[in-house]
Image (cartoon, coloured by chain):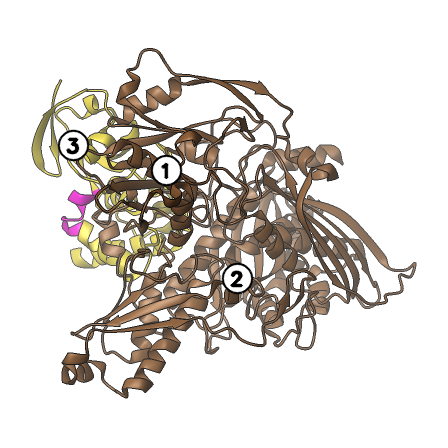
Amino acid sequence: MKIDFILNDKPVSLVTEPMRRLLDVLREDFGLTGTKESCGEGECGACTVLLDDKPVTSCIVNLIHVQNKKVLTSEGISQKPLGKLLIDCFDETNAVQCGFCFPGFLVSSYYYLKSEGEPNLEKIRTALSGNICRCTGYQKIFDSVMMACKRKQEQEK
Amino acid sequence: MKKVRKFDAIPKLNGTYKFIDDYYKPDMLHGGFLYSKCHHGKIKKIKFPPNFNRDEFTIVSHHDILGENIVPEPEKDQPFMAETEVMHFGQVILGVAHQNRQILKKFIDGIEVIYEELPAITDIEECLSNEENAFGKTLEVKHSADIDIKNNLIHTKRVYRTPHQEQAYLETQGMMAVFYPNDNVIFVRGTMQCPYFVKSALDAIFGNSITKSIVETSEGIGGAFGGKEDFPNIIAGITALLAYKSGKPVKAVLDRADDILITTKRHPSWVEIESYTDPITNKLLKVKIDYRLDAGAYQTLSPVVLSRGVLHASSGYAIEDCYIKGRLFRSNTPSNGAFRGFGAPQALFAMESHIDNIAAQLDIDPYILRKKNVLKLGDEFPTTQPVIENNLYDCLEKVLENSNYHKKYRKFKEWNRNNKLKKGIGLSLGLHGGGYTGNGEKVLNSEIKMVIEKNADINIYVANTDMGQGAHTTLAQMVDETIGHPHSKTKVMLPNTDKSPDSGPTVASRTIYIVGNMLRNLIKEIKKQLRFNNLEEYVEKHQDDFPLEFHSHFKPDPQVIFDDKTCQGVAYKDYSWAACTIEITYDPLTYEISVDRCWNVLDVGETVNPEIARGQVEGGVVQAIGYGLSEFFYKKGFGRKYGFTDYTMPTSMDIPKIEIEFIHTDNSIPKGLGEIPMDYPAPALRNAFLNATGLQIDEIPLTPETILTNLGEK
């Protein structure tokens, strides 16, 4: 079946099995290996991407569901100004440990920063509750997102 | 002591850093494993699914092993693949490869194995309470004194239980193997902690049929926590056999369910402590500890875990008459292995809970008992090792001050009289010996290599991996700071057994403590030898001499003498110390505990990179809170399929505010750091629950189910 969608702001199309997992298509057909598989059941958030601007876990999204929609991955986000701002903050706080979950955290944080952006710890916690990190204990992730929210507010002033 | 950013943070964030599943090779096959679904039995027949063309698949069994079917490290008792008998659910029987991952999975799922079932021990309680299941060597530590057991002494005897814990590194285990027939060389890349363990596994499985094996880690290692210490040996060995037989590159990456079912976990424990305490002086006079671990079906790493457990079993207390006995118990479950803390979290859970149980019996604040008995200068460990500092006492006093313990201890009592929700504050001490136990580092004889290039760049060759703990950033920082470079010139190369000498495994909180200090000493020697102040200027003037290569071996301290047979002497040259308080709120209606605050005061010596050090403590504490509160595993009938849906680790919603202070950082050496934050929080949490409710529950995790069951028994 022919599937068309917008991937990281560029139109793409491919002929493939429509029930394949979006995660596999991103990794195998487009070489976008920033999207990681960890739990394979939509629980840990390592494979989070934005689908029409909303976060989804791509390991439980079949390709048919992205027909004519927009998909944004960590690779795409890292090219955007708010993505770069977040990466700077994660880097500055030395938040990253093994890093396997971080592309997923980048996507969820980007969604929060773009849609809400308030430097509020409770809201940030909730926004990131779909992403599991086993290394960091989350503290520095909160610090980084908080820092990015504040910097974004300053830029907008 | 300055802020240095991690070199790998940005590529990890933008997705360009390569983890094992991100490597592709043209012509590559995917590898998978058929494992036992029987706990113990004889393999009668293996039936392949009829609707597949078997010629499309490469299949290896123990018959294809060219060397020995025994994993050589650490204890030589586990086969790579089962032969005629399986000893546990999840034991690998076959390796299979195919070019399509989905077809491979369907084929493996379709294979049927017929077993003649044999009796099996799959119940942890049954395993650990029956002395007949003990196997391997018994360890004993004795610190004798003639203590007169008078009638007025407080006698306390209780059993403490801890469950399996899954490492749950976010990246599952995986390896890629390539066979080069022209050179007769096997190359393996993967996610691992110990490249030289994997190399010796390859040398064992191939014997003399290959000229050489080379092991290199993947660029990224997605967490390990001990889980990638010994199990990678099996995956690497079988994947390499598949590559050898098929003549094609093979990549085998486990899916989550398989990773949970077949790889190693933290040992469940059963620890009985019997003690006599003087109610007048609050002095612990006599303590007897029976420390038992469920090793699983094979010993593998368990004797080493047992030894560390026994050596940490009396926690941070001076006990004149102390007897500790440690034993391994056999069950028909996957072999348990390394997990951050390595026997110490089980030991400290028991002893730190026991202290609070004695305090409850004496009806005193548990702090008083700790203050009286904490190890101080002039005291001895049960091994007779002298205590040379008061740093644990300092941690204790500091954490009380930081958390305002005394005020809260009083305030919560008052609060609990008038409120439905109960509040509690709990205390625990922690200690962790850095590096290998006793003579271990001497035997390891670690080697490091350093190359100063023509442009004055310094390349470090060590076998220690960066699995997220930031070791390569910190090691490079130590070298840069010692040499006095104005900017970073040092890089730690990706560990490769053909280029990096064996600087020992990446375990036991030893990478910065042992290998980092070796690098520092080497660069000091080089500085003295070449007599330079500015390396860049020196290299420019002496261009013809470079690149220059330097090697160095571990220099053991002659003072460190330990008798492995009697467990007497210096078990660990340098201990890290910690004290912790945890504050909780308990809802007696739903039996739910929420962890509100956690204060940590640690002495880990010098903190080379304070932000990285904090990150280690924050992460360890959260893993320990999961251990104490929610991470629940099978207790009997192993084999149920688990995922992250039902193995519940802390999320961003479940964690307290974590406060950390490092003390005595003016120490000239960084001591062990990675493991200690996993060791002590679980008992502090349990003690906070006791403080809130008066209920002495001697097991974890404190899920609503555990609490309800214990209430029912009272």
**Marks 2/3 same chain:** no
- Mark 1 belongs to which amino acid? Cys
Q: Residue at x 39, y 32 (%)?
A: B64
Residue B475, quarter of the rendered image? bottom left
Specify whether B173 is left or right of B359: left
Residue position for label 1: A44
Label 2 resides on the chain identified as B
Residue B247, quarter of the rendered image? top left
Report the Cα–Cα distance between label 2 and label 3.
Answer: 46 Å
Mark 3, other Cα within 10 Å: few <14 / some 14–19 / many ≥20: few
**Which quarter of the rendered picture does the N terminus of chain A lie within?**
top left
Q: Look at the image and give the colour of chain B.
A: brown
Residue position for label 3: A29
Q: Residue at x 73, y 37 (%)?
A: B132
Chain letter, colour yellow in render: A
SS type, badge 2:
loop
Q: Which callout, 1 or 3, points to the residue nearer the camera?
A: 3
Mark 1, other Cα within 10 Å: few <14 / some 14–19 / many ≥20: many
Q: Main secondary structure of the magenta part?
A: helix
Taking depth in this image into account, of A24 and A6 the one nearest to the observer is A24
Residue position for label 2: B436
SS type, badge 3:
helix
Q: Which callout, 2 or 1, points to the residue nearer the camera?
A: 2
Specify whether B185 is left or right of B714: left
Taking depth in this image into account, of B71 and B269 the one nearest to the observer is B71
SS type, badge 1:
loop
**Marks 2/1 same chain:** no
Does residue B679 lie above or below B51 as drawn? Answer: below
**Which quarter of the rendered picture does the C terminus of chain A lie within?**
bottom left
**Numbered range of the magenta stretch:** A74-82
- Mark 3 belongs to which amino acid? Asp
